[in-house]
Amino acid sequence: MSEELDDLFDDANGDLAVGDLESAIGKYRRCVEMDPAFFDGWHALGMALMKTGHIKEAIGAGLQATTLRPNDLLAWTALSQMYVQDGQIGEAEDAKGKARILSLGGRVVKE
């Protein structure tokens, strides 16, 4: 990760910590524009979007995070929460099932 991306991500996390979600979202967006493979940026963006009620966009960011790291427990758990908030219960249960597999030491995708 570049120093510029690292600094921007830290700034976004600082905004999130003080409750400035809109500023954090803008910075997380810039992070993933700078590096589309930046898992932490996608995950954080999805969570911040979910907190602000932008559920459809949060799901998109959550899906990108699970695509980048298909064996990440927190990414699947977050995606499940996003689906629940959107009323997509079947999708939420599927994501929850993947999180459960990972929590038991399994893998969703063989690496």
Image: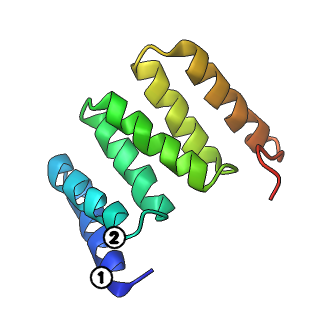
State the mark number for residue 34.
2
Q: What is the three-letter code of the residue carrying label 2?
A: Met
The location of residue 87, given as percent across then percent down, is 44, 13
State the image quarter where residue 27 is shown: bottom left
Determine which quarter of the picture holds residue 5. Answer: bottom left
Other residues around mark 2 within 10 Å, as few (<14) / some (14–19) / many (≥20): few
Q: Which residue shows up at 49% across the image and 64% down it? A: 37
Residue at image x 39%, y 44%? Answer: 46
Left or right: residue 34 compared with residue 19: right
87 horizontally vs 70: left or right: left
- x, y percentage for residue 55? 34, 29
For mark 1, what is the residue? 4
Query: Which numbered disc flags the more N-terminal residue, 1 or 2?
Result: 1
> Which residue type does callout 1 highlight?
Glu
Q: Position of residue 83 (x, y in %)?
A: 48, 24
Left or right of 98? Residue 12 is left
Does dot 2 land on a helix, a strand or a loop?
A: helix
Residue at x 50% of width, y 60% of height:
39
Q: Secondary structure at mark 1?
A: helix
Instruction: Determine contact: label 1, label 2, CB under 8 Å.
Output: yes
